[in-house]
Image (cartoon, rainbow, N blue to C red):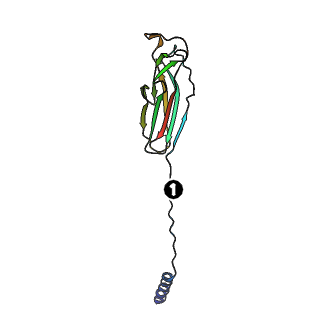
Amino acid sequence: MKKFLFFAFFSIFLSLSLCAQTSATLFLRGVVLGKIDISSTIVETNIINLSGSQSMMLGSIFLSSNTTNGYSVTIMSRNGGVMKSSASGEAEALPYSLNFGGIDGIDLSNSFQLSFASNGDMSGTEYPLMVNFPGIDSMNNPLSPGVYEDIVTITISVT
């Protein structure tokens, strides 16, 4: 019986090894692009009562990214960090600064750039945005009544 089992096993092994073998190799490659999701509670036009306060919360920007490289934020002011009178042009201007995500007193006389790390889990981070300006009542040269404005551009990109 042992010899029969041995020959049966040997015959099955031999027949399996003599069968033609075929195989196919499949190479799969996929690409995951860097992604950044941006949402904001900031309205396009904010009307600020310059006589009543020295700062105002403008809203928040919520950022999330799947890259571990993080992202960069560039903030630029058309007027170099001053709100200019629409009536008198450049003759009267009110300087201001911004607070963005825990960084206070950002001077926009030149563009401002900062980088943030990202852990890549898309959980996201909220960055509050606030504008600060001097009290107009305490300025050496009082401002004329009117509308003062500037355009601020915030650009966010994956690094």
Give the residue at x 51% y 56%.
30
Give the residue at x 55% y 35%.
39
- The quarter of the picture where the C terminus appears is top left
Residue 126 percent coordinates (x, y): 49, 34
Give the residue at x 49% y 42%.
65
Residue 103 percent coordinates (x, y): 42, 29
* Label 1 crowd (10 A; few <14 / some 14-19 / many >=20): few
Asked whether, in this view, residue 40 is left or right of residue 81, the answer is right
Quarter of image, res 95: top left
Q: Is mark 1 on a helix, strand or loop?
A: loop
Give the residue at x 49% y 28%.
129
Residue 6 percent coordinates (x, y): 46, 86
Residue 71 percent coordinates (x, y): 45, 40
Which one is in front, 127 or 154?
154
Q: Mark 1 points at which residue?
A: 30
Q: In this view, does 152 lie above or below 29?
A: above
Amino acid type, residue under disc 1 in the picture: Gly
Count of numbered labels shown in the rendering: 1
Q: Is residue 118 above or below residue 23?
A: above
Which one is in front, 43 or 85?
85
